[in-house]
Image: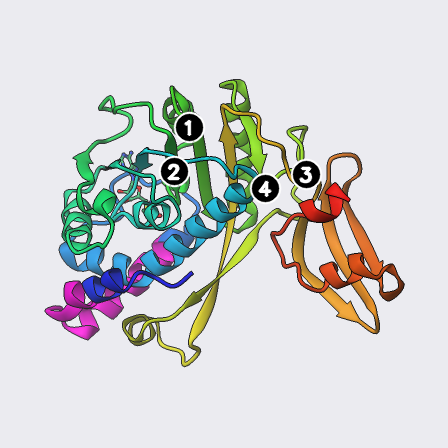
């Protein structure tokens, strides 16, 4: 999922006037702060330089994670055509850009955040978008615990926000975000603690009367809840030259690991099972770890003699449904 070219150019422009050294120092500070598991007692993003640094080094990755998660949902909810979007804790608007790319049906979007400077940069980036929904988005300053915010949108996204809040505030935010929402998407880093936050959010969404659609093939307790392993996925991100300059390294891509849950008022049919980790192919045998409704996470082997099933198994990837819907239908 390539980043929209207007966004790449906008990020270049946003960083152009800031000395490279200052940006690199801000990136290092943000990386170490986001690794700290403690909730934030004050906004993590402060100065214009920090906001520009965040946008340049994180927006491509959070855009990719949101895009990948929504893409998995869309495979199941094929008739979902949201018109309204609420990007909760949206910062500079990565989820807005990703949702607008996937859903041309969007006509109205609002981004909520506590940091004025992030909203300002987000608005500036959005002005040049090819999408009318991105260009016309509303950018509202909101501090969750203090200010009421407008509920109710066809699609609500809460991406990479929960770790900054206490557990009680995380639950309150998800409950609030799900009020009158049709579909709620929650995304966190693909780490053991990110997965635990997603599991807690999943409970709140179920209690709010929504149905879990993805990635889970059921809405029973998660078989990985004990923490021995964790459910996460991977989105490949092409690094822009600005990104390479800020983070160092020569590779033209990086893999963003994320955990997510998407729940809906409409009970869409779920995947029959979900592939966790890259399938491994060796000597005519494909081995996959599949989360199933009946047996938890089980190793699934597909041999060459299984013909069409084998050919399909060689094309699926980490995060896809297994078996895919065309095989289930047969
Ligand atoms: C890591 S950034 C993620 C931004 C964006 N959602 C993304 O995926 O790139 C977390 C955002 O949540 C916002 N945030 C955290 N706590 C908040 C609160 N209590 N009220 C409003 N916004 C908050 C921060 O200001 C920040 O912009």
Residue 254 percent coordinates (x, y): 46, 68
* Distance between mark 3 and mark 4 Cα atoms: 18 Å
- The CB of the residue at mark 4 lies under 8 Å from ligand 1: no
Find numbered disc 1 in the image and state the secondary structure of the residue it sits on: helix
Q: Are marks 2 and 1 in contact (CB under 8 Å)?
A: yes
How would you rate the neighbour count of disc 2 (Cα within 10 Å): few for under 14, some for 14-19, many for 20 or more? many
Q: Label for residue 158?
A: 2
Horizontally, residue 197 falls left or right of residue 35, namely: right
Q: Residue 226 carries which label?
A: 3
Q: Do the residues labelled 3 and 1 touch (CB within 8 Å)?
A: no
- Residue denoted by label 1: 174
Q: Name the residue under label 4.
A: 215
Graded by Cα atoms within 10 Å as few (under 14), some (14 to 19) or many (20 or more), the crowding at tag 1 reads many
Residue pictured at 52% horizontal, 51% vertical: 190
Mark 4–mark 2 CB contact (< 8 Å): no
Give the percent coordinates (x, y) of residue 115: 19, 42
Cα separation between marks 2 and 3 = 24 Å
Q: Is mark 2 on a helix, strand or loop?
A: strand
- Residue 19 lies in magenta, yes or no? yes
Q: Nearer the viewer, mark 3 or mark 1?
A: 1
Residue at the front extreme? 330
Task: Identify the residue shown where x is 48% and y is 52%.
Answer: 68
First in sequence: mark 2 vs mark 1: 2
> Distance of mark 3 from mark 1, alpha carbons?
22 Å
The correct choice, above or below, for 128 with respect to 42 in the image is below
Q: Seen from this angle, which residue lies furthest left?
A: 17
Which residues are drawn in magenta? 12-33
Q: Name the image quarter holding the C terminus.
A: top right
| Residue 228 appears left or right of 169 | right
User: Which sits in the foreground, 74 or 22?
Assistant: 74
Distance in Å between CA atoms under marks 4 and 2 = 16 Å
């Amino acid at each position: 999922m390539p980043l929209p070219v207007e966004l790449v150019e906008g990020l270049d422009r946003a960083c152009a006037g800031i000395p490279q050294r200052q940006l690199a120092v801000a990136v290092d500070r943000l990386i170490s702060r986001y690794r700290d598991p403690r909730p934030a007692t004050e906004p993590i993003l402060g100065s214009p330089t920090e906001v520009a640094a965040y946008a340049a080094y994180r927006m491509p990755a959070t855009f990719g994670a949101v895009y990948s998660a929504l893409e998995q949902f869309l495979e199941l909810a094929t008739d979902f055509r949201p018109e309204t979007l609420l990007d909760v804790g949206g910062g500079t608007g990565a989820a807005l850009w990703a949702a607008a790319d996937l859903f041309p049906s969007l006509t109205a979007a609002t981004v909520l955040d506590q940091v004025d400077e992030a909203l300002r940069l987000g608005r500036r980036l959005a002005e040049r978008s090819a999408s009318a929904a991105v260009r016309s988005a509303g950018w509202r300053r909101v501090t969750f615990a203090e200010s009421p915010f407008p509920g109710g949108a066809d699609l609500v996204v809460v991406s990479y926000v929960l770790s900054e809040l206490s557990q009680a505030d995380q639950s309150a935010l998800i409950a609030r975000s799900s009020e009158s929402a049709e579909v709620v998407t929650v995304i966190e880093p693909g780490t053991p603690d990110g997965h635990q936050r997603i599991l807690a959010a999943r409970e709140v969404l179920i209690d709010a009367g929504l149905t879990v659609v993805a990635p889970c093939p059921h809405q029973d307790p998660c078989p990985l809840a004990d923490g021995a392993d964790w459910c996460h996925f991977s989105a490949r991100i092409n690094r822009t030259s600005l990104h390479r300059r800020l983070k160092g390294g020569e590779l033209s891509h990086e893999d963003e690991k994320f955990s997510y849950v998407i729940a809906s008022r409409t009970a869409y049919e779920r995947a029959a099972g979900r592939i966790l980790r890259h399938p491994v192919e060796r000597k005519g045998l494909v081995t996959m770890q599949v989360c199933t409704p009946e047996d938890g996470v089980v190793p699934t082997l597909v041999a060459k003699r299984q013909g069409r099933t084998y050919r399909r198994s060689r094309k699926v990837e980490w995060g896809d449904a297994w078996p895919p819907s065309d095989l289930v239908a047969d």
